[in-house]
């Protein structure tokens, strides 16, 4: 099992990859059979290629974004992240604040991630 410091480092890698806006770089952090639901109420995307497609769609639909892990909490092979993402699309700004819960495999790749946020966590134009 990865140490708390190693888990935090993996989240740092994720933040850097998301901010790179390179879908393949983000997807490389996930296991081949990873499960992702963002938000958790949506149907899960299954597999590294589905994770890559999710990020590619988000990149294509936005002009820029800044993703940050405001707080990181570890427990065994899981990591809960209080996140914020500021997105610019067509000159409009949107912010989402929520929680992502990751499960990390022995190899350091994410085996699952579920994001928890809804309309109450979404701010437009501020």
Image (tube, rainbow, N blue to C red):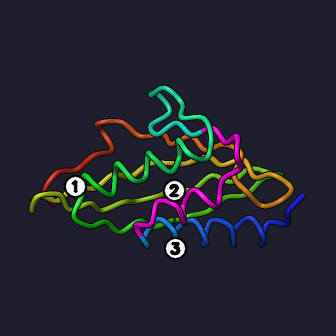
Quarter of the rendering occupied by the C terminus: bottom left
Picture quadrant where residue 89 is located: bottom left
Residue 30 part of the magenta segment: yes
* Mark seen at residue 16: 3
Q: Position of residue 22 (x, y in %)?
A: 44, 66
Q: Which of marks 3 and 1 is nearer the N terminus?
A: 3
Q: How crowded is mark 1: few (under 14 residues within 10 Å), some or many (20 or more)?
A: some
Front tag of 2 and 1: 1
Residue 23, percent from left and from top: 46, 59
Asked if residue 125 lies left or right of residue 11, the reply is: left
Which residue shows up at 49% across the image and 26% down it? 43
Question: Is 36 in front, or is 120?
Answer: 36
Count neighbours of disc 2 (C-alpha within 10 A) and say few if under 14, some if 14 to 19, many if 20 or more.
some
**Quadrant placement of the N terminus:** bottom right
At a point 51% along the width and 48% down the height, the residue shown is 99
Residue denoted by label 1: 94
Instruction: Report helix, strand or loop for mark 3.
Output: helix
Q: How far apart are marks 2 and 3 (CA)?
A: 16 Å
Q: Is mark 1 on a helix, strand or loop?
A: strand
Q: Which residue is drawn at 39% across and 53% down?
A: 56
Contact, CB < 8 Å: mark 2 with mark 3?
Answer: no
Range of magenta residues: 21-35
Rounded to the nearest whole Å, what is the CA distance between mark 2 and mark 1?
17 Å
Q: Is mark 2 on a helix, strand or loop?
A: strand
Q: Residue at x 45, y 46 (%)?
A: 53
Asked if 25 appears above or below 102 in the picture, the reply is below
**2 vs 3, front mark:** 3
Q: Is residue 18 found left or right of 95 in the rendered image?
A: right
Residue 88 part of the magenta segment: no
Specify the label residue 82 is tagged with: 2
């Amino acid at each position: 099992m990865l140490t708390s410091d190693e888990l935090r480092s993996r989240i740092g890698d994720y933040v850097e990859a998301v901010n790179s806006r390179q879908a393949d770089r983000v997807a490389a952090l996930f296991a081949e059979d990873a499960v992702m639901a963002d938000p958790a109420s949506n149907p899960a995307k299954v597999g590294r290629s589905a994770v890559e497609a999710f990020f590619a769609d988000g990149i294509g639909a936005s002009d820029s974004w800044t993703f940050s892990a405001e707080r990181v909490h570890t427990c065994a092979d899981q990591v809960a992240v209080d996140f914020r993402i500021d997105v610019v699309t067509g000159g409009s700004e949107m912010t989402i604040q929520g929680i992502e819960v990751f499960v990390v495999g022995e190899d350091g790749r994410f085996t699952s991630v579920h994001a928890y946020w809804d309309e109450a966590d979404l701010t437009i134009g501020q």
